[in-house]
Image (cartoon, rainbow, N blue to C red):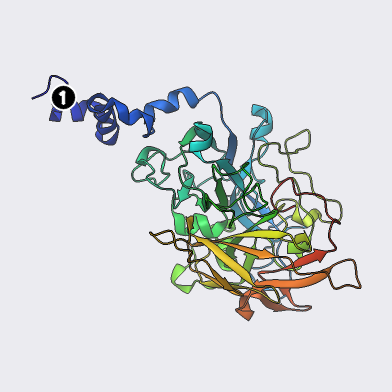
Amino acid sequence: MSTNSYKFSRRDFLKLGGGLAALAVADRMFPSLRKSILHPIDVVSAQNDYDIFFAGTDGWIHLPETPAIPPFHPDVLAPAPFTTYVFGFRNVSNMSAAQRLNQKMKAQHSAPVFWMDQYEKTNTDFKLKLTNLGLQIRPDLTDAHTVHWHGFRDAIPYFDGEPHGSVAVPPGKEFTYVYRPHEPGTYMFHCHVEDVEHVQMGMAGMVFVRPSQDGTSLGGFTKFAYNDGDGMTGFDREFSMMLTEMWAEAHWADAHIQLPEWSDYHVDFALLNGRTYPDTLAPNGSIDPFNPVYDANGDMIPTPGYEHLQYQPISSLVNCNEGERVLLRFANLGFMPITMTLDGIPMRVVGKDATLLRGRDGADISYMTSNILLHAGNSADAIFTAPAYQGPGPYDTYLLYNRNYKLSNNLSAGGLGGQMTEVRVYPAGTLPPQTLPNT
């Protein structure tokens, strides 16, 4: 036996505790693994800093008031101009402790979008701190919260967010997740505590990893969805499309201390970035995850004229110049399969579930389509080239929508209430370069 070998006894296991012990022993047996495996002990150095800071809490948002679904919608407890009770995450980065505490009952839907560079480019871990502010409407529910990164490769249990095998954050506490993202692409995240309820109630959002190829020049582009090597996933603008659902009875029940029968589940509202059409076209609120804008109390600032969307800040309107390449990042955390259709503009699907569509031999297996099917938990990356501007108005309009009519239109007057938005194509040079996704 080598003098460098190490015998791991049952007593060692009991002393060190399960998975943490296994990692510690692996470190002693194979010290080179520290170059590629993130250890829980590394979080000690992360407790006093973060790249983004989230809070879990509850709050109110606005959905179309018609058609009414008595007694569940609009909720009589909702303060004007809101209609619907939710759980959710809030971005509390750069806030004081007093400001953070003021964000109880001010949950955002959908959850803030954030992104990071591939680890191979920066050799830097990404740190997400989570605090649990509790539920103001339901103080009897002492639910813990987690951030589970859906689809994240090789997550160790300590940071995975699945509460049976990792850390969950009870009310009043904090925890820092540390990520080492090796695979670029589009993902989603959600609370994994009582996940059927918490995801449906609104604790879901999108996260994506930028490839190490970013910043190089390939095919006339410097921004890419994947490390393609030839620029085929290059783009000029990008837009996230987070697909979720609302069952009005479940939200009413949580607000009124009732228990819904989940076997009766059905979709009353299908949401695109937390909004329904035509609110999907309304301007963004503060959406920069690393430089959020708040008022003096830390509260979100509503866009004038859109006060009902104060806690739904992410627009789904796609603006582009003719000839530009546009990346659409889709993620579905509803419970229903969805087919998103873009009328009049073909899309090339270049990635699915954070995987570049290329065969093992490097063959291109991306494909052109007008319809993208996403089952629950799926993501897809699609790129289109904006067609030539036709006029005579300031822009040409194309519709992007769920082809299931009941999910693109909830049958209210004027065709409101579903997963639909617009792609607006302007003459070349009209719009300046994009600085943030969804702008």
Q: Residue furthest right?
A: 392
Above or below — where is 223 with respect to 29? Answer: below
The answer to whether 179 is drawn above or below residue 8 in the figure is below
* Residue located 40% across and 48% down the image: 153
Question: In the depicted view, which residue is nearer to us: 330 or 271?
Answer: 330
Q: Residue furthest top?
A: 3
Q: Quadrant of the N terminus?
A: top left
- Estimate the x, y position of residue 209 in percent, counting from the top left: 54, 46
Residue 319 locus on image (x, y percent): 77, 60
- Picture quadrant of residue 425: bottom right
Residue identified by numbered label 1: 6
Q: Is residue 109 visible?
A: yes
Dot 1: what SS? loop
Q: Is residue 262 left or right of residue 283?
A: left
Q: Residue at x 52, y 35 (%)?
A: 126
Q: Nearer the viewer, residue 24 or 129?
A: 24
Q: Residue at x 53, y 73 (%)?
A: 266
Q: Amino acid at mark 1?
A: Tyr
